[in-house]
Image (tube, rainbow, N blue to C red):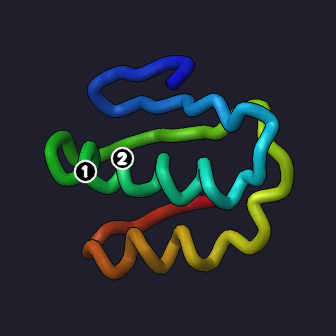
């Protein structure tokens, strides 16, 4: 994690596939949004995260709204 706060996460993707880091940071963001009401996240130093829909659907299944 490059930066972390009560409602903020910036994950270092370590040059890897963005889908892995994006899934991890979405899980963390869902937990933070449940506690605080909002969360903002990003993944740096990674390659393509493929399609955005799975991350948005993960938030929707948790009863939350996500913007990619």
Label 1: few (<14), some (14–19) or many (≥20) C-alpha neighbours in 10 Å: some
55 versus 24 height, above or below: below
Label 2: few (<14), some (14–19) or many (≥20) C-alpha neighbours in 10 Å: some
Q: Position of residue 36 (x, y in %)?
A: 19, 40
Q: Position of residue 24 (x, y in %)?
A: 48, 51
Residue at x-position 26% and y-position 75%? 63
Residue at x-position 48% and y-position 79%? 57
Residue at x-position 39% and y-position 69%? 59
Q: Secondary structure at mark 1?
A: helix
**How many numbered marks appear?**
2
Residue on which disc 1 sits: 31
Residue found at the very far right of the displayed protein = 47
Q: Quadrant of residue 49?
A: bottom right
Q: Position of residue 40 (x, y in %)?
A: 46, 40
Badges 1 and 2: C-beta atoms under 8 Å apart? Answer: yes
**Image quarter (top left, top right, bottom left or bottom right) of the C terminus:** bottom right
- Horizontal side of 36 relative to 50 (left or right) equals left
Q: Nearer the viewer, residue 4 or 36?
A: 4
Q: Position of residue 28 (x, y in %)?
A: 36, 47
Q: Nearer the viewer, residue 49 or 5?
A: 49
Q: CA distance from mark 1 to mark 2?
A: 5 Å
Q: Secondary structure at mark 2?
A: helix
- Horizontal side of 16 relative to 41 (left or right) equals right
Residue at x-position 73% and y-position 52%? 18
Residue on which disc 2 sits: 28
Q: Quadrant of residue 15?
A: top right
34 versus 66 height, above or below: above
Mark identifier at residue 54: none
30 versus 58 height, above or below: above
């Amino acid at each position: 994690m490059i930066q972390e706060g009560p409602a903020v996460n910036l994950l270092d993707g370590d040059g890897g596939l963005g889908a892995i880091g994006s899934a991890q940071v979405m899980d963390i963001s869902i937990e933070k949004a449940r506690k605080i009401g909002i969360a903002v996240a990003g993944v740096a130093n990674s390659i393509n995260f493929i399609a955005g829909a799975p991350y948005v659907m993960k938030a929707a299944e948790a009863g939350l709204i996500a913007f990619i």
